[in-house]
Amino acid sequence: MCLISIIIPVYNAEDYIDECFNSVSNINDSIEIILIDDKSTDNSRSKLIEYSKRHANVKTIFHNNNIGVSEARNSGLNIAIGKYIIFLDSDDFIYPNSFNQLLYQIHTNLNIDVYIVNAVSDHLAYNSIYYCNYNKVYSNVTVLKNISSLSHNLDIGVCWRYIIKRDILTSNNITFLANARIYEDQEFFVRVFTSSANYFFLKNFHYHHNVRNNSISQNINFYCMTSCLHVLISLIIMFEENKSDDLSMYFIFSRIKAMLIVLVHRLFLCSNDELVSISNLFNKLINKFKCVEKFSELFRNIKIIHSNSKHLSIEYYNYYKKRNINLIPSCTTNIFIYCAGILGKGIAKILQDESYNIIGFIDDEKSIRGKKIYGLEVFSKNDVRNYMKKNDDFHVLICTQRKNIIKILIEHLVNLGLSKNRYSIAYSEFTD
């Protein structure tokens, strides 16, 4: 019997796929590995062919066109036969011996719908997100309530954090949203968790997630904005479909708030022409919000939501730009941006347009240290300490919506000797 299907979408991953595949290739015969090449242009395809020749438990799918990670995972789901599904990104890997506890739990017939696993990453955002304790069965009620309290956090919605019973997916027709090439797992995650009854946090299963600056999650292409909107619209539809279930509504609403954060942050990265182009979709989204009384709470302090402007997204852009610029002391024009993610990139763009001098980014992620983003260098905390010895005319703007990370970053700045008036937290309407 095949207990586990491991689905690995692959696109131009020749530099990473060996480590990824080797981490799962020699477990036992109860595991199948499904590799989906989404029309790679590098040597990935030939690597996958070689894996399938050497391993009887490997299945390969080759797409004729690049159609995105959602459809790649869906292709894998179509042929998977395992009792449980694991989604593994091609540049990540699973630690040795991690499967021992999982196989033990399955063999002891615990009827678990979703296993939660430990994420290990150089990026602070993916570590230490806990909403239940290890090695204990949790009900749907407890888990959805606990996750809903973390509404500012998108990182709990990534599909590779979970090992999912395949019956949950097939009996509820759950697949990845086809027209979303990014944030697709946020919508998938909501469907899975509102359809599951029990959960188990595996203490010794460790998934290593690599954060690459050129990954799709850090992409600033315009389709990322439209993808975000498609996910939001789907979540709103889910919210309306679950009106008879207060718990599900509460949970879905919290995830909509998390996606709204992303929507606003990505607006900062749009050009004027793109802001105009996005307005039709954006206004469609706002009209859906207005139809649901609960959503009015999100916008109660934003007067522009009642605007009749044709291009509402431009008003949003200007509103958030003003709010963030007002955080910077009037006598300061030299700025460090702490966090080089989407929000940090957007704030840097805004401030550069307003003639601020961006000294550079500060980021704790080792993989981008010393590199340049938007022509701006990425500094470590030690680099900032050395800079402070020679300069005192600067302000640090912390650019993350994650409350648990904000606390850590403030501690770092205090340890560097910065007083409260030397740093600010970037404004984001929808954080708790």
Image (cartoon, rainbow, N blue to C red):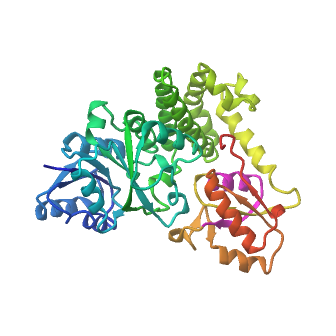
| Residue 162, position as x, y percentages in the image | 37, 49
Q: Which residues fall within the magenta stretch?
A: 344-363
Viewer-nearest residue: 165 or 232: 165
Count of picture labels? 0
Looking at the image, residue 134 lies above or below residue 227: below
- Residue 409 belongs to magenta span: no
Viewer-nearest residue: 68 or 9: 9
Q: Is residue 104 visible?
A: yes
Left or right of 296? Residue 115 is left
| Residue 279, position as x, y percentages in the image | 60, 30
For the point 62% across and 42% down, the residue is 267
Quarter-wise, where is residue 215 in the image? bottom left
For the point 37% across and 33% down, the residue is 195
| Residue 262, position as x, y percentages in the image | 57, 44
For the point 55% across and 40% down, the residue is 148
Q: Is residue 180 visible?
A: no
Looking at the image, residue 335 lies above or below residue 35: below
Left or right of 28? Residue 24 is right
Viewer-nearest residue: 75 or 171: 171
For the point 78% across and 44% down, the residue is 322
| Residue 429, position as x, y percentages in the image | 69, 41
Q: Quadrant of the C terminus?
A: top right
